[in-house]
Image (cartoon, rainbow, N blue to C red):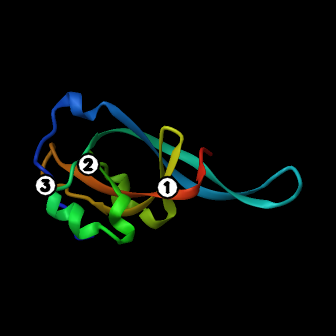
Amino acid sequence: MTTQTIKARFQPYQMRYKVTFNSQTEKENAIGQTVTVNSPLFTKHYAKVKISINQKFSAVGTEAEHDVYIAVKHDKRFDEMDYAKLTATIGNDDYRIVDINAVDDNYLSYDMITLRKVSGHSGT
């Protein structure tokens, strides 16, 4: 889906949800198999971002149909990381980060993050 624009400000009550950003590392389990596990990096509060009806209709039938959009206070760590190697955990669900639209205009800047649920996997 195309890059989203987000409103300039969110009210504090909207930033009541928590998301944990993870890096994926490979570890050996008890029987000697190499498995990919999420290693938590940091947790942020986020606001849910709603998309327009037009954007919803445009996404029908594509991979983006069930994407989740969140906004977090701008964090310089996103500028330094390869978001393709990050995952996000909300509750017990794991998400792949599709896009991070990082905006650092002023101290009230927010980053728009597009998440896609990882199928067949939940938890760490």
Residue furthest to the top: 13
Residue 77 placed where, x, y %?
37, 53
The C terminus, quarter of image: top right
Q: Secondary structure at mark 3?
A: loop
Query: Which residue is depicted at the point 25% across and 58% down?
Result: 102
The residue tagged 2 is 74
- Residue 56: image quadrant is bottom left
Numbered badge on residue 105: 3
Q: How far, Cα to Cα, is label 2 from label 3?
A: 9 Å
* Whether residue 6 is situated above or below residue 3 in the rendered picture: above
The residue tagged 1 is 87
Residue 3 versus residue 21: which sits nearer the camera? 3
Residue 42 placed where, x, y %?
46, 42
Query: Which residue is depicted at the point 50% across and 64% down?
Result: 85
Whether pointer 1 and pointer 3 mark residues with C-beta atoms closer than 8 Å, the reply is no
Whether pointer 2 and pointer 3 mark residues with C-beta atoms closer than 8 Å, the reply is no
Q: How far, Cα to Cα, is label 2 from label 1?
A: 17 Å
Residue 33 placed where, x, y %?
83, 60
Q: Secondary structure at mark 1?
A: strand
Query: Which residue is depicted at the point 39% across and 69% down?
Result: 63
* Whether residue 37 is situated above or below residue 43 in the rendered picture: below
Of the two numbered discs 2 and 3 on the same chain, state the one appearing first in sequence: 2
* Whether residue 102 is situated above or below residue 43 in the rendered picture: below
Whether pointer 2 and pointer 1 mark residues with C-beta atoms closer than 8 Å, the reply is no
